[in-house]
Image (cartoon, rainbow, N blue to C red):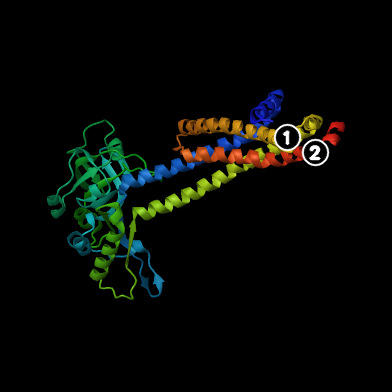
Amino acid sequence: MNLTNLFKIALRALVNNKMRAFLTMLGIIIGVASVITMLAIGQGSKKSIEQQVSEMGSNMIMIHPGAERRGGVRQDPSAMQTLKLEDYTSLQQETTFLAGVSPNVSKSGQFINGANNYPSSVNGVGLDYLTIRQLKVENGEMFTAADILSSAKVCVIGKTIVDNLFPDGSDPVGQVIRFDKIPFRVVGVLQSKGYNSMGQDQDAVVLAPYTTVMKRLLAVTYLQGIYASAITEDMTEEAIDEISTILRANHKLKETDDDDFNVRSQQELSEMLNTTTDLMTTLLACIAGISLVVGGIGIMNIMYVSVTERIREIGLRMSVGARGIDILSQFLIEAVMISITGGIIGVLFGIGASFAVNSIASWPVYIQMWSVILSFVVCTITGIFFGWYPAKKAADLDPIEAIRYE
């Protein structure tokens, strides 16, 4: 019996039992749609994180004071004073892998403009900070090197600060706002960046010369951190090694001494977040994949029923010359047609569900072609795997016993 006839017989059998065939497909449809949707959500989250990290500066390097031991007790890194202005100057002058370096000191408090106020932090930074963090001044200008030398009371503010301190829509540039009773003249407004992937408002920011924050607000001589950026993302590791070498020399640390500072890059943060996202995506895909197995069991169950119902038909076909391989192929084709048709419908539902999630819940989704192909291949293999045994049982029937079957 040729393959065309086998397909016609299998298709006729499915058409004669439309509702049963559809209900059998339903498990495959739900399984494939679930896998595609879960993978799309997981990959969308990963892409969103990568984009947010890129916007923050994919080659950004963060240097913070390290925890020291005093009396056998490890101290809180935020209380350490191991980073000095000399370290910032050395990194500026001695490094070959850094495109920019900026000190960082900050203080939290209340910003006030007339009857309006807003809680935030003022960050004392250098001129390279905008480049490192990929920020742009939309209105006005950045403070100058002269402002840093003179510890001028000037600042650049983000969109959230503007909306809360100047709700009437007036131009904030040139106006004075107060922070802890100290007046700051606004010289620029940053371009809006919105919220990052961790839900932090990137526009609730106020930048001022680091000398101003150190002298007028904190009255300290040490730095809370240093931001830097490698020339290229590929040079990040070399830049980190160079930073460590310079800081260890500045701090006169011996080879056996631990670092009294911590150096972290955006690559480390990105890899950590991606590892977590990949784990969650795999977990979601495995949970969704369970429905594929359930759908496969449904195929096996229905094929068993189909074989039982058509034992006399099988016997008649064998008695007129049909071979065991023909019977096997007939029922296997039925199982594969059910799984492939269910897979196609499931792919369409999965793509539609992914866009629905993005539209309704505003979750980032990203459908990759490999996830669609993988789901389709898995559902086809499921049909073959679970359809084989019932088909083999039908092929092994004795023709005489099959004809006599009541």
Residue under pointer 2: 397
**Distance CA(mark 1)–CA(mark 2):** 10 Å
Residue under pointer 1: 327
Observer-nearest of 234 and 145 = 234
**Residue 373 in view (yes/no):** yes
- The amino acid beneath tag 2 is Leu
Q: Are marks 1 and 2 in contact (CB under 8 Å)?
A: yes
Residue 287 placement: quadrant: top right
Secondary structure, mark 1, is helix
In the image, residue 209 sits, relative to residue 1, either above or below, namely: below
In the image, residue 250 sits, relative to residue 218, either above or below, namely: below
Residue at 28%, 44% (x, y): give it: 111
Relative placement, left or right, of 338 versus 185 is right
Q: Position of residue 344 (x, y in %)?
A: 56, 31
Secondary structure, mark 2, is loop
Residue at 69%, 33% (x, y): give it: 330
Other residues around mark 2 within 10 Å, as few (<14) / some (14–19) / many (≥20): some
Observer-nearest of 225 and 23 = 23
Other residues around mark 1 within 10 Å, as few (<14) / some (14–19) / many (≥20): many
Q: Position of residue 398 (x, y in %)?
A: 82, 38
Residue at 23%, 48% (x, y): give it: 131
* Image quadrant in which the C terminus is located: top right
Q: Which badge, 1 or 2, comes first in the chain's sequence?
A: 1
- The amino acid beneath tag 1 is Ile
* Image quadrant in which the N terminus is located: top right
- Which label is found at residue 284? none
- Residue sitting farthest toward the front: 321
Observer-nearest of 304 and 286 = 304
Q: Position of residue 382 (x, y in %)?
A: 63, 40
Relative placement, left or right, of 380 versus 302 is left
